[in-house]
Image: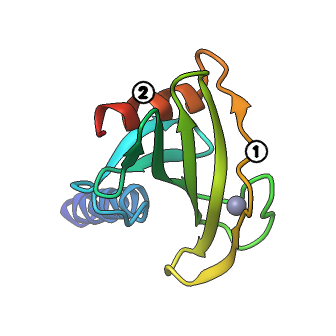
Amino acid sequence: MLQLKKIVFILAVFFTVFLSSVSFASCNLDQNRWELVASNNKYSAYLDTQTVKSFGNIAEAWICWYFPSNCQFHTTGGEHYHYNLFAINYINNTCGLKSYVNRDRNGSVTDSHIFPNVDYRPIPPGTVLESIAIAAKKRT
Ligand SMILES: [Zn+2]
């Protein structure tokens, strides 16, 4: 009976450790620098609080989207990161992408691009883009 209790205890410890390592085998961004802006069951979006810039009514901010598994664009490889440099225009409430860098779970760059022109699109209310715009504004 004592033996069984020991086994149950060991299993309980094992599963506790296993579960906590699963939940912590996650986003490796420095939480002091990257502010959580939005998340759902597919991603967490973080604002780089150290690099937000403003030029008049335009703000530029890096957002990192952490995907614990594949995303709609990357259907293999699992856990990875999308870094997006957004330009946000607070006059007409639009935003566009200036550049992006994708990284794998180890931080190695898998893809990157700089857009020669920013294609500004309206920021729909109640969306993650609006949350990003609000969070960036607070840092300018
Ligand atoms: Zn992806």
Tell me the mark number nearer the camera, choosing from 1 and 2: 1
**Quick check: can you spot residue 110?**
yes
Is residue 71 left or right of 107 when viewed as pictured?
right
Residue 39 at x, y = what percent? 50, 37
Q: Look at 66% across and 67% down and name the residue there.
A: 78
Is residue 85 left or right of 31 when viewed as pictured?
right
Disc 1 Cβ-to-ligand 1 distance below 8 Å: no
Residue 14 at x, y = what percent? 33, 65
Above or below residue 59? Residue 49 is below
Determine whether label 1 and label 2 are within 8 Å by CB.
no
Amino acid type, residue under disc 1 in the picture: Asp
Find the residue positioned furthest to the front. 56
Q: Which mark is residue 119?
A: 1
Residue 133 at x, y = what percent? 48, 32
Is residue 63 left or right of 32 when viewed as pictured?
right
Above or below residue 30? Residue 59 is above
Q: Which mark is residue 134?
A: 2
Quadrant assignment, res 101: bottom right
